[in-house]
Image (spheres, rainbow, N blue to C red):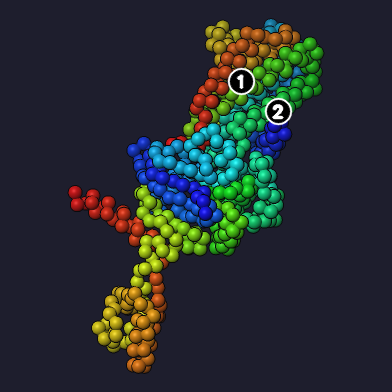
Amino acid sequence: MCAAVTVEGLRKSYGAVLAVRDVSFTVASGEIFALLGPNGAGKSTTLEILEGFRRRDAGSVDVLGIDPGDRSRGRELRERIGLVLQDIAVEPYLTVRETLARNAGYYRAPRDVDEVIGLVDLAGLERRKVRTLSGGQKRRLDLALGMIGNPSLLFLDEPTTGFDPNARRSAWELIRRLRDTGTTVVLTTHYMEEAQQLADRVAIIADGRLVSEGTTASLGGRDTERARIRFAPPPDISVGELPVPARPDGDGLVTVESAEPTMTLHQLTEWALRRDCTLDQLVVERPSLEDVYLRLTRDDAAESTLEGSLR
Amino acid sequence: MSAMVWHQVRYEQLSFWRNPQSAFFTFVMPVLVITIFGALFNGGSASSYFYGVSPLRYYVATIAALSVLGSCYSQLAIVLATRRQNGILKRVRATPLPTWMYFVGLLAHCVLVSVVVAGLIVLVGRLYGVPVPDRSQWLPIVVTLLLGAASFCAIGVAVAALIRNAEAAPAVVQFVLFPLVFLSGTYMPIQSDTVNVVTGALPVRPFNDALLGAMAQGTGFAWDSLGVLALWGVLGAIVAIRRFRWDPRPE
Ligand SMILES: Nc1ncnc2c1ncn2[C@@H]1O[C@H](COP(=O)(O)OP(=O)(O)OP(=O)(O)O)[C@@H](O)[C@H]1O
Ligand SMILES: [Mg+2]
């Protein structure tokens, strides 16, 4: 698989604000790549450099074999990429269909307008003026504008913000379908479930730096971390009487961490059955993507405030 | 290429006519003004106060000029500032549509609106008995209208480039235009030589004068006035090209 996007040592500052510091990653062609990170981490800035909107201060960037900083190849680049910006931007006085038909006219080989309207679930609203659409419907029109040119690379900056749960699921379905037909997708999101559901690979940016990168399953060592088994201990049993080491959680439950959850569970349930009692509210969990995300982005923030207060 | 220009003009027209604010201020207003003036000055005879023509004949020319200001200068400054603030310009920039094509479409749209409004004003004047200009004046009239439209388009884009906040755009645009239009003789002939010297170097009065000459007095091309107007157009174009921004949040 060749790379659709290669970023190396990217830097960008706005005056005194260092928005992106030394970020490197590659996106393989045909995959969905998600950028996660707190507000102000530098996700949109990174995307806008790749899209050719902003100039970089240092580093090298390659998008479909083109340097987006090279204005002379801008048109060629824009012919092959599609994008959705973080803020909704659609003309208020055109209808849904007119908006798409107008933009379709800008590309050499656009998708069929009605097909795209169907794909983003706006069928039946073709003749509505954009200003009468709801926020989520406008966002879907924005997404439709991103794909009308039949791009081989799609940049989506928080594409499903403001979508209801059904609309979000159908947007995921759509993005997956685009990927399956060969489109590479680079997106940012604040929804962990979205990254989990969609992304082949994820990178976490905090404070302008890339702090971790990998598949959703392995990010931040998720796959090798210990599983947690939680349950309510039988009444009158103290933590020390359990067959495996456990710690109380404060909310009346106890947590057992285990590298061998099958074995540990067997020990626990056998013990409970023998004593003829139950393990109420029993669950087995792995650290979720959100746990890993919070740890990776909190570490960073905590360190800098600690440093600050120690001085 | 011309197909693409039409593509652009078509969607600009759709947006324009459906926006009650732009349709009213750029289109209905000047037609309304000339209709009212027609009722007020109907039957007035030629006087030296109106440069030797009848009052209504004078107003048909100046209000036609005003309609070009509205369709080009005001409309462009407000529309572009608003579109930039809403991120619509940035969204256009993300497509392969060339920049110049976007602007050619927009300017063609503005010129089209100007020509239609100016034509309507002449028609209203006709209904009140103002004679349609002589055939020999048609070429100077068309050239003056087109040059005025082009110059005021350039100035409009320049003002849009200088305005930071789209909410302030209508206020800024009117704040500049209203006193200038008044002092340039659009609503009444100005007798003060001092004022006339100053406004003669600004863009509105030369346009009024050139249009008055061709439409009312039948004196053909007013080369001096056209020259001043063209200079302002070039100045506007330079500012527009150097300062124009697409992004609502510049780097
Ligand atoms: N045009 C600009 N001028 C000045 N500073 C900017 C500009 N754009 C972004 N910044 C700053 O750069 C940093 C990164 O911003 P960016 O928009 O890339 O963050 P983000 O990760 O997309 O955040 P969010 O999740 O809130 O969208 C922030 O500190 C922001 O204030
Ligand atoms: Mg952002």
Residue at 38 percent across and 60 percent down: it is: A293
Q: Is residue A21 visible?
A: yes
**Callout 2 secondary element:** helix
Reading the image, the residue beneath label 2 is B112
Reading the image, the residue beneath label 1 is B151
Question: Relative to A270, is B72 on the left or the right?
Answer: right
Tell which subunit mark 2 falls on: B
- Residue A60 sits in quarter: top left
Q: A196 above or below B217?
A: below
- N-terminal label among 1 and 2: 2
- Along the line of sight, which residue is nearer the eye, A233 or A175? A175
Q: Which mark is residue A222?
A: none
Residue at 36 percent across and 44 percent down: it is: A21
- Residue B180 sits in quarter: top right
Residue furthest out toward the left: A311
Calculate the distance from the C-alpha at mark 1 to the C-alpha at mark 2. 15 Å
Q: Amino acid at mark 1?
A: Ser
Where residue A54 sits in the image (x, y, percent)? 46, 38
